[in-house]
Image (cartoon, helix red, strand yellow):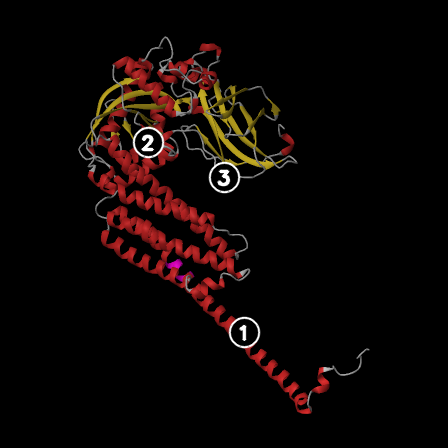
Amino acid sequence: MSNSGEEPLLDRHATTDERRRRPRRTKSRRKVLGVVLGVVALLVVAVAAWVGVRGYQAKGELEAAIPLVTQLKTQVTSGDSAGAIDSMNRLTQHAQSAADLTSDPVWRATELLPWVGSNLTVMRELSSTVNDVSRYGVQPLTGLAGSIGLSDFKPVDGRVDLQPLLDAQGVLADSSAAVGDAVARVDALDGDGVIQPLADARLQLLDKLTEASGELTTLSKAAVLLPAMLGADGPRNYLLLFQNNAELRSTGGIPGALALVNTDAGSIKLSQQTSGSSFRQFPEPVIELPLDTKSLYGDNTAEFMQDVNFTPNFALSGQIAREMWNRKFGLQVDGVISLDPVALSYLLKATGPIALPSGDQLTSENAVKLLLQDVYAKYEQPPEQDAFFASAAAAVFDKVASGNVNPAALVSALGQAGEENRVLVWSASDEDQQVLAGTTLAGGLPKSSETEQRFGVYFNDSTTAKMDPYLQVNIEAGQAVCRNDGLPLNSVRVTLTNTAPADAATSLPDYVTGGGEFGIPPGNIRTNIAAYGAEGLYNLGLTRDGAAFPYQPSTELGYGVSKVEIELAPGDSTVLDFQFLGDAPQTKAVSVQHTPFVYALETKALEVDCQNALQ
């Protein structure tokens, strides 16, 4: 039977008083609920205010801390120990305060909230990272202020005091590791979905930490490598190759002047000099060349001293040069070091002008032109040219070894030359090679990363002359997605121009133009260009002035290579586009490692045209 429209059966037994009390209970419940909601609202406001105020304060602490890092670096390198300690104390206070402000239980609990939580997590991690860097990465360095500085990197009376460098090894290694860990920590932070100012702050901190990590890694490796190379554990011998960029090779230029340097317990002595041309062709390769290298560059690479750096793999060039020196002079050197006239010009900024036995004055402004162009007009015979090069190299070496240099300018000069791949080092010691690995000094092929696609473009003169100061090179690189599968097209554009005067055949010496030998008209420049793609990429070939052009496809050390020979008359220009297909649907920044020229060259961004793609 339906009870529709009637009171519930249970209510029939309720008293009148009970029925009257029910609305009051409902009102009471509503009142309690209102109070609870009010309290929750107050708590939300309080938490928001707490987190907001502390976040604002933490931001201020971080902004106060960052400039102190740069100030501290200057104080440490200049030996201002008192200033470094004061800056370090202030940095530590600001960093610790920022970490404390963003790590209390209220802050951590609020991180669990949607949207706002990710912002708070990033803020806490950034503050904590800065605090860790200040304590474990920067603070230990203050102990080096006054005990090691830029002056410790320069010789005094032909000797470098190795003890400060040895004492600094542990501190530099620990600091380098701490900052390296911080880079990985910030890089791993998920910046998606956070507010823009915080995302920008993360990227700015990452850039700062990456820069600092690179500098510390370099210093740490230098503190390990320099004592070893300077004979801390016993005498060593090094072969110096002075590369002549007037006749290009992959790592710079032909080895023109050569020298033997002896080191022992920090002392440095130039004991022997000769020229690359004094080495006659060996009847067969002095070492067994890798098949890929032999295919690309031929047996000449291991038969002529002036061709040992046909390959951009300097570790291989060093081994070849070492064996050639051994066969000629009966000495197995402990390593091979190369530099070029441009690097010498940088060093001259630290030494000041140097008077040469010839009566010339060598300066940072005239060194490149004097050593790579004027010398051929002044001295017609190769032996005279070799003697001039040898005297210039010896004069610069003696000035640096004497310690009569500006230490800050010396370190800056070596740093700039290293960044431009103008100073290369190979060591017969496996331990030294491990320290060199990954640095610009090692002269290895370009290494790509998850975010950067790196290519190599290397030049070898085949004019057999000294025309390359007139070869103007421009390099551009870019990437675009031109296929449905999303694989990116990488393009490296090389523009070559022969800037020699129209009358080069008569106005330039035969030694510079080649005098028509090998069927090359005087004034023309003939060059081999090898473009190295990153490992795993597919080599699509190249175009010349917009049209497909024949080339030699090959490989070296697992890198796909496109090699081509170009000859240009005075005033001629041509454009080569080397193209490589990516191995994954991912876009990256593109960069190019290249042969050092007589001038500085920066790779420019290229807007890739898919319609001209070789796919």
Q: Secondary structure at mark 3?
A: loop
Residue drawn at x 38%, y 10% as measured from the top left: 284
Compare marks 3 and 2 and give the one earlier in the sequence: 2
The vertical placement of 101 against 526, above or below, is below
What numbered label is drawn on residue 345? 2
- Residue of label 1: 41
- Relative to 3, 29 lies left or right: left
Res 294 quadrant in image: top left
Q: How far apart are the alpha carbons under marks 1 and 2? A: 71 Å
Q: Amino acid at mark 2?
A: Ser
Residue at the spot of label 3: 450
Q: Which is nearer the N-term, disc 1 or disc 3? A: 1
Q: CA–CA distance between discs 3 and 2?
A: 36 Å
Q: From which residue to which does the magenta span run?
A: 59-64
Dot 1: what SS? helix
Residue 410 appears in view? no
Q: Position of residue 92 (x, y in %)?
A: 32, 57
**Magenta stretch, main secondary structure class:** helix
| Residue sitting farthest toward the top | 283
Question: Is 210 above or below relative to 24?
Answer: above
Q: Position of residue 435 (x, y in %)?
A: 33, 34
